[in-house]
Structures are given as C-alpha cells and as structure tokens.
Amino acid sequence: RKAVEETVVDGAQLCVVEGMVAITNPARIKWKGAKLLQHKLRVGSIQAAFREEDWVRVEVRGTEFGSGMQVLRWAMPRLEKRIGPVVAYDVLGTDISAHARQSGLPRVMVGRVGGDPVEG
C-alpha cells in the first residue's frame, strides 16, 4: 500500500499507510457520561465521515473491546502480518486523557470542541 504521509521522527523515516477508527463500545460511552446515539446511526455517521479517505479503515469490531488500547493490541499483529513492522499511536481525546492508563505506545492527544485545553 502506498504511503499517505511520510515524515522523519527521531531520525527514522515513518510512512503512514493506514489509519483505523474503532467504533467505541457503547458501555464505554455511557461510562464517560455521554449521550449514546442509536448504533446504526453512530456507525453510519462515522463511516460517512471517512468515506472519502481510502487510507482510513472504520473498524466496527471496536465495540467488542473495552478500550482503544485493547483494539490496538488485537489489530497490531494482523497489520504486521499484512504490511510488515508497524508503529502504532494511541490517540485519545483530551476529555479522557486524565483517566487513561499508560499504553507504552506514543500518544497523540486530540482536543474536542468545547473541551478543556491540555498542555504537554
């Protein structure tokens, strides 16, 4: 698969070849105190948002896991089997960053509209 983006991090050239958006487990959304959309509407909205992005895969099986980190641990061996060595990033919304456990992976924090700013 052709790289979508190439960059150098700490002297190593990295190529972004795939992104994955895992659909969140409904129990996790309720735990966070957020309102829950009907499953079909939630999945359809996410799929529509990424329809034009052929490098992003919407992973509906994300609902079978308790966290994004669990999805990554499940997905990484499958990705490595398909495309070779991978570097995965743990991407979290700033609204849950204080509750997240350390994953051992590089972490990217994403701010959300109306969310508190985060430093660091």
Image (cartoon, rainbow, N blue to C red):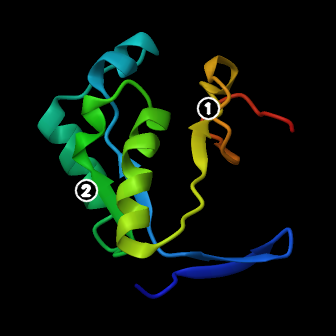
Q: Is residue 77 above or below residue 12?
A: above
State the residue position of label 1: 114
Q: Which numbered marker is on residue 47?
A: 2
Q: Residue at x 25, y 59 (%)?
A: 48
Q: Earlier in the sequence, mark 2 or mark 1?
A: 2
Q: Is residue 73 above or below residue 66?
A: below
User: Where on the picture, by quarter, is residue 79?
Assistant: bottom left
Q: Amino acid at mark 2?
A: Gln
- Disc 2 + disc 1, Cβ < 8 Å: no
- Residue furthest out toward the bottom: 2
* The one of 116 and 102 positioned closer to us in this rendering: 102
Q: Secondary structure at mark 1?
A: loop
Single out the mark in the foreground, 2 or 1.
2
Residue 50: image location, x then y, percent? 34, 63
Along the horizontal axis of the image, is 116 left or right of 114?
A: right
Along the horizontal axis of the image, is 92 left or right of 79?
A: right
Q: Amino acid at mark 1?
A: Gly
Residue 116: image location, x then y, percent? 71, 28
Residue 112 visible within the image: no
Residue 22: image location, x then y, percent? 35, 45
